[in-house]
Amino acid sequence: MKITRGEGILENFLAEQRYKVVKQVLSNFKNKDRVLDIGCGSYPKFLISLDFKEKFGIDKYDYDFNNYGVNFIKFDLEKNKKLPFEDNFFDVITALALIEHLEENVTKNLFFEVFRILKNNGIFLITTPSKISKPILELFSKLKIVSKEEIEEHKKCYEISEIYKLFELANFKNINVKLFELGFNIIGYGYKLL
């Protein structure tokens, strides 16, 4: 079953590795009422695997998740500044392999919006390719090991310090940002602590 829109050989493997790292971070998280995955893609495998009372996914493409127990909302972050949720609504929000597809101003706004809709003591967790991965991903896309379409959609690859700053500017606390997958990806998370 395809996880991403791409057809590359490594796409599903890399997505599975991301999910493992993210689930490890979330394993000690106690509040499990509502989770949102921003940019959830066509098959909500990650959301399905989580043990939350309510699961939400948003993506700019239209998908039918009725059979999976996931509330789906079609939503384009680049056309809408305000996420379609009330304040303090979610315990956990994820954006896995998403922000590299967004313009920098959209990404910055996203962090502020996530802070708004996250409950106190909630966690926001992201993954994104690191800056050093860019030439490797471009080579892999030419070799059809990863999806050329998805790599061409990348607008920015980040440094750890840039991810940290995004969390910090949006007022997140207990921020943790580090490399994983041999340094080719970044995982970052922060908490809303008021």
Image (cartoon, grey):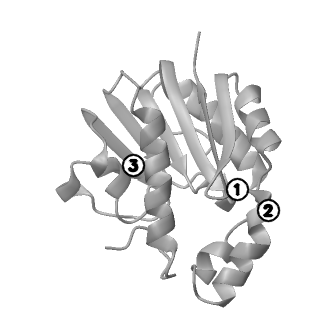
Task: Give the percent coordinates (x, y) of residue 100.
Answer: 68, 58
Locate the N terminus and report the quarter of the image it occupies: bottom left
Q: Position of residue 135 (x, y in %)?
A: 79, 74
Q: Position of residue 184 (x, y in %)?
A: 69, 60
Between disc 2 and disc 1, the foreground one is 1
Residue 89, quarter of the rendered image: top left
Q: Quadrant of the C terminus?
A: top right
Q: Are marks 2 and 1 in contact (CB under 8 Å)?
A: yes
Residue 78 shows in the view: no
Residue nearest the observer in this picture, 13 or 157:
13
Residue hosting label 3: 57
Q: Earlier in the sequence, mark 2 or mark 1?
A: 2
Quarter of the image for residue 125 reads: top right
The amino acid type, in three-letter code, at marker 3 is: Gly
Q: Nearer the viewer, mark 3 or mark 2?
A: 2
- Mark 3 / mark 2, whichever is N-terminal: 3
| Camera sees residue 159 | yes
Q: Give the answer, above or below, for where 45 lies relative to 112.
A: below
Residue type, numbered disc 1: Gly
Q: Position of residue 40 (x, y in %)?
A: 44, 55
**Mark nearer the N terminus (1 vs 3):** 3
Q: Secondary structure at mark 1?
A: loop
Check residue 183 in the rendering and tell me which mark sits there, or answer none.
1
List the residue tagged with mark 2: 132
Label 2 sits on what residue type? Ile
Secondary structure at badge 2 equals helix
For the point 50% across and 72% down, which residue is it?
A: 11
